[in-house]
Amino acid sequence: MTTDSQNNQAVDSTLDKQQIARNKYAAYESQLRKGRSTKVKIALAVLILLAVALGSWFLMQKFMQTGSGEQEIYTGYAMRGTLGVNISGWGSAAPKEKAEIGGKIIGTIDEVYVSVGKEVKKGDALFKIDAEETREKLSQANKEYMQLSDRVNSLRQDVENLVLTTPFDGHLIQAEKIKNGEYVNAGQSLGRLVDDSTMSLSLYFTYGYLGQIKEGMSAKISVPATMTTLTGKVDSVEPIRKVNPDGTICFRVNFSMKNPGTLTEGLEATAYIVNNQNEKLLPYDYDYLAFSQEINLVAKSSGESVKVDLIEYSDYKKGQELLILSNNNLIQTLEDEKKSLVALGERVSDLAKQAAETITTSPINGLITSLVIQPGSVLSGAGTPALVIADLSEMTISTNIDEMDISHVQLGMPVSVQYDQMEGTVFMEGIITELSYEATSAGDRGGPAYFPATISVNNPGALKPGMGVSYYINAITKEDCLMVPSAAIINTEFGPAVFIPKSIKDQFPEILDLPEDFLPKDFVAIGVTIGLSDANNTEIIEGLEEGTEVYLQQSNMPNYGGGIIF
């Protein structure tokens, strides 16, 4: 072995011994640290438990001291004074009078004579429009109006025809069987109505008698089937030319006669007339009797039958109802079309006015608050205003009055109004000009009800549309009334009450029987009748005398009798 090899082995041996020593020390240190960590943890846990116990002891002592301490008592007195019910709120300002111009106008703007912020007077020119397009629209609107008018008239007639009546006195010789509730279609046959009180007959006479037979002449009418001869008359003479097979040329004479009740249509009959020379003028041939009037009854509208009076061989008077139909859709359609006709008529009037007046003028005095047009702008009549004019000399404030206050508010009441601006608060006086006594808010959904109201104020100039304002209404003032601080009033199952010192209870005839736990120490409860109240005091109508000491409720007092103790 060389010297270098021996030296290297010596170094390695020394390093191994040092590493073994370090490992033993590291193991010792690790074990020592584990022991220290356990001891520290135990010590910290003990300290935390001691702190919790000590804190709990202090809290218990504090709680016991608080529970055993005396509650501070506050009292007031019944005294005479003035009560005022003041109602406050807020709302938004709006001009009392405003005009929106150009919403229905159609055409192209030629000239604009105003600008935003400009004051205008009633009758001042605002803008000029080219009316050529308006005239075209007017022509089309007139055509549509005539068409819709015809439709409305047709629908109106259909509705009237839901009731079928007899056009004359007559006899129903044929009738369809229609039941109530059955649907009847327009054009459906219903029966045949005839006037058989008078029968008619048409006969032909040779032209040699033309000048001898006159309207109104008496005639004898013979009916072989019934072997009767009846008196009739000439209703008319018709100088027609009927050529018979034998070459005879005839004219027609129409007769009528009263029906004795035994005649009907289709019976063979003839007649003769006696002329001024007492000669019988005989017809060329015979003919057949016919009813003087007859009509085939048909439904003129469709609907469900609600009344039917179609009895075969029954007699009816003129105007008697035979059938009544129901058709709600038809009636509703008529109402809708009538409304459309009214709207279209208004449109025609507007267009006619626009076509005649190309320059639009201001309908009111006021300020131009909005302007969206310039020369070349096209107005379509869609409803969007071209400009808005507002009279800001008088403003209105829309607000809602709470249901608890509405009974104290009346039309014409004065109102104090204020709003803020850069220079400070501005105060104004107004009056209530509109007041609704019907709630329009959430009263039907369990929430509070509100009643719309309008306050009118003269505007000094700074109040602008949309600005928020506050208002105050001195609704009620009552002087020289007995009152107590409102904190003295409690609600019990017996009604309103107050606590009075036990030392003066003999001065009052009736003490309320309340549980001892709910009574302040050395106090008893008596019932009172209350009246008005404001933010601080409540009127006592009955139950107390002036100067009586009363207990004032604190916020931590218990609730008794289901009411809220104030």
Image (spheres, rainbow, N blue to C red):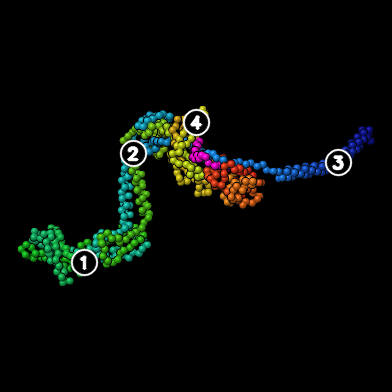
Identify the amino acid type marked 4.
Val
Image quarter hosting the C terminus: top right
Q: Earlier in the sequence, mark 4 or mark 3?
A: 3
Q: Which mark is residue 132?
A: none
- Residue 38 visible: yes
Query: To which residue does mark 2 refer?
Result: 351
Where residue 170 sits, quadrant-wise, is: bottom left
- Residue 479 magenta: yes
Q: Residues within 10 Å of mark 2 (few under 14, many from 20)?
A: many
Residue 503's x, y, as percent? 64, 46
Which amino acid type is shown beneath numbered disc 1? Glu
Quarter of the image containing the N terminus? Answer: top right
User: Going from the N terminus, do you reach mark 1 or mark 2 first?
Assistant: 1
4 or 2: tag closer to the N-terminus: 2
Query: Residue at label 1?
Result: 265
Which residue is label 4 attached to?
426
Residue numbers of the magenta segment? 470-487
* Badge 3 element: helix
Please tell me whether mark 4 or mark 2 is closer to you in this view: 4
Between residue 499 and residue 6, name the one nearer to us: 499
| Residue 188 in sight | no
Alpha-carbon span between mark 1 and mark 2:
62 Å
Residue 319 image point, x, y percent:
27, 59
- Mark 1 → mark 3, Cα distance in angstroms: 142 Å
Which amino acid type is shown beneath numbered disc 2?
Answer: Leu
- Horizontal side, residue 134 vs residue 79: left or right: left
* Residue displayed at 36% across by 44% down: 343
Q: Are marks 1 and 2 in contact (CB under 8 Å)?
A: no
Residue tagged 3? 32
Residue neighbourhood size for the residue with mark 3, other residues' Cα within 10 Å, grouped as few (<14), some (14–19), many (≥20): few
Label 4 secondary element: strand
